[in-house]
Amino acid sequence: MGCRKRAAKHQLLRVTAVEGVCVPDPRGALPGRGAHLHLDPACLDLAVRRRAFPRAFRLQGSLDTERLRGFIEERAGGASQAGRLP
């Protein structure tokens, strides 16, 4: 969504909007419209800058993305440290 690059569904994170907040939905079980995003902070930044979330969820105004940002940074940080050699 942010970087507009194609990827397999299992490589993307589903995001939903719950009461004006973008919520990560890694299991894909939350109700409502969903948008898919790479687990990359740069992709999230592009989506926020392009105002892609309100369009994807068909909502007016801006949405809070802090919870989503924390989730992505936690996962992206863990993935980069897992690949490091001691």
Image (spheres, helix red, strand yellow):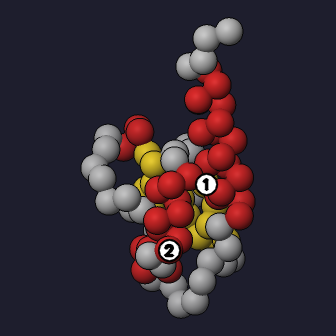
Residue at position x 51%, y 55% from top? Answer: 42
Q: Is residue 34 left or right of residue 72?
A: left
Tally the numbered discs: 2
> Is 85 positioned to the left or the right of 11 in the image?
right
Residue 44: give x, y in percent of width and height: 52, 59
From the viewer's side, name the closer residue of 13 and 39.
Answer: 39
Which quadrant of the structure image shows residue 58? bottom left
Q: Which residue is mark 2?
A: 49
Residue ranking furthest to the left? 6
As rendered, which of 75 and 23 lies closer to the eye?
A: 75
Q: Residue at x 62, y 77 (%)?
A: 63
Among numbered discs 1 and 2, the one appearing first in the sequence: 1
Percent x, y of residue 76: 60, 39
Residue 60: percent from the left, percent from the top? 53, 90
Secondary structure under the numbered disc 2 in the rendered image: helix
Residue at 59% in and 29% down: 80
Cα separation, mark 1 vs mark 2, equals: 18 Å
For disc 1, the marked residue is 24
Residue placed farthest to the bottom in the image? Answer: 60
Q: Are marks 1 and 2 in contact (CB under 8 Å)?
A: no
- Amino acid type of the residue that numbered disc 2 sits on in the rendered structure: Arg
